[in-house]
Amino acid sequence: MSTQTDFPGTSSNGARLTPQRFWTLLGADTRNAGRDPTLIFGMALAVLPTILFPAFRAPINAWAMGMFGIPDLVLWASPMLLVLPAILIGWITGFLFLEDRDEATLMAIEITPFGKGAYLQYRTIATVLVTFLISVVNGFVFTPHLGIFLILFMAILVALFSISIAFIFPALARNKVEGLALTKVVNLFSMAPLLALIPSFWRYLAAPLPSFWIGELINPAGIPGLPLWAILCAGLVTHLFMLVWLYRLTLRRTG
Amino acid sequence: MISVSDLAFTYPGANSATLNHLSFEIASGEVYGLLGPSGAGKSTTQKILMGLLSGFSGSARLFGEDVSSLGRAIYERIGVSFELPTLYLRLTARENLKLFAALYDRPTRTPEEVLTMVDLQDAADQRVETFSKGMKMRLNLCRALLHDPELLFLDEPTTGQDPARARITRELILRLKSEGKTIFLTTHNMTEADEVCDRVGFLSGGNIPVSGTPADLKREFGRRYLAVDARDGDKIKRHEFSMQGLGTNRQFMDLLEADRIASMHTLEASLDDVFIKATGGAIGEAAQ
């Protein structure tokens, strides 16, 4: 008797992720998400700061100055405004993952030459790409003082953060109901960059949270802290660590 | 085309094996029906052959090669229609088919072509969430046919369909057979199995204790008797005659000569009878 342990279909001779396939899948995902009222609300909210703040930055700042005496409120809020679209895009992708698993479309994809692995690859690239582009625009809108190199670096971190958020859902939620409950926890991540505004070394207790380092990088208050190279390294390491952990968990959970 | 030998599989945490020393073969161009009660392991067998389950022992071969060595390209040659609809509900039928067609390297049929095959062309631009279960199952079948595969796995393909639609699906299966396709069918529907399968196997206790052509099985499990309903005055009276020596049976010959026979038929078993005898009347008691 021969013992079978290998998982069939794991060799790489299937259909690859070509640009044409990428755009077909992205079109289908956009239509699919665009027909769900909750998901379309999330999509609109993700691009709202980018559209709204350039036009209303001055009146908002003037109002905040008059009301609380805070100069340039938009800059102070920028860490959160940069992370929010990433959380929303990640949340949309995460919910599409949950639907794929709940309705077994992921199993239907697994029995095509493309396969589940390539599909996860597509979703990862699509989420990273969309978030990166929005974050670059947001970087120039909210934090132009960072300069192009740091804006691009920050956009990479935010994009990695976004796909990590997406993997949280299939990795930790068993269905869409659990996914909704998890959304509340995920929303707390949007507050983590604000912890970098605490003018004390105690703020580094939040160091394991990847989005904390986005706030630390922007540092709108100019609070003394770690050197820039250490912030960049810590930001990259925490984001990659979270991503790899959740990706592996997702693979395990999607069977 | 398919060769399974001494296959065994136990789900993690289960007390008993779902498949146990299962062996069968399916030739190219054959329609094979794997029948059995719910939970007998029909879908498990399909999943192993499709490469969706690992951790089994024994041998499972497709196209003459072990399933473990086939790689992803094998999915260009097989089409699968699952027992439950596995579709994007907010997309239309056409959008679903376009999406899945994009996942194959080989040329695919157009959505219109496959939708017409199952009489779903009028619903092409309707969102799947508005479909009945039967329509979803037909769309499942469309997806399995998109890339014109040589081997089809059909799991309860007529579930949720009304008799007229189910007939269209059965006729489609027969047409695919006439085109030389090999079809592995799992079903609870014995009439369907009787109509479309060249051979059937009854899965019970993790293996196949009974298999053969539907006609042979019905004869084997039936009685070699002829039931004759004959007029007796105003009433109809039933007579049963052994098939052995029927031509010399005086009573039967008298009925024939007197022109009193209203109807007659052989008492062969139905596939339902064979199912009950082969599986011991088991209904859904197996582990998975």
Image: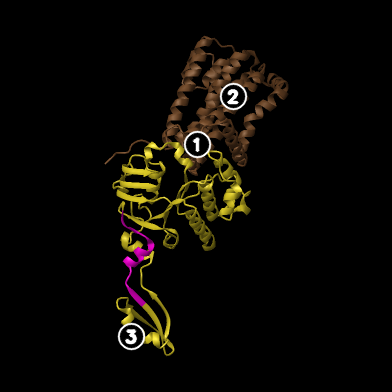
B278 drawn magenta: no
Query: From the viewer's perspective, is the residue at label 3 or at label 2 nearer?
Result: 3
Foreground residue among A61 and A115: A115
Q: Is residue B55 left or right of residue A247?
A: left
What residue did someone put label 3 on?
B251
Residue A40 x, y percent position in the rendering: 62, 37
What residue did someone put label 2 on?
A132
Q: Chain of mark 2?
A: A
Please state, as top left, top right, bottom left or bottom right, where the N terminus of chain A lies in the image: top left
How busy is the neighbourhood of tag 1: few (under 14 within 10 Å), some, or many (20 plus)?
Answer: many
Q: Magenta stretch?
A: B208-226
Residues marked 3 and 2 touching at CB (< 8 Å): no
Q: Secondary structure at mark 3?
A: helix
Q: Amino acid at mark 1?
A: Phe
Q: Chain of mark 3?
A: B
The colour with which the image depicts chain B is yellow
Query: From the viewer's perspective, is the residue at label 1 or at label 3 nearer?
Result: 3
Q: Secondary structure at mark 2?
A: helix
Residue A12 x, y percent position in the rendering: 45, 31
How busy is the neighbourhood of tag 2: few (under 14 within 10 Å), some, or many (20 plus)?
Answer: many
- The residue located at (35%, 50%) in the rendering is B25
Tell me the distance, in whole angstroms, between the alpha carbons under discs 1 and 2.
Answer: 25 Å
Q: Is residue A27 left or right of residue A231?
A: right
- The residue located at (35%, 83%) in the rendering is B252
What residue did someone put label 1 on?
A114
The colour with which the image depicts chain A is brown
Please state, as top left, top right, bottom left or bottom right, where the C terminus of chain A lies in the image: top left
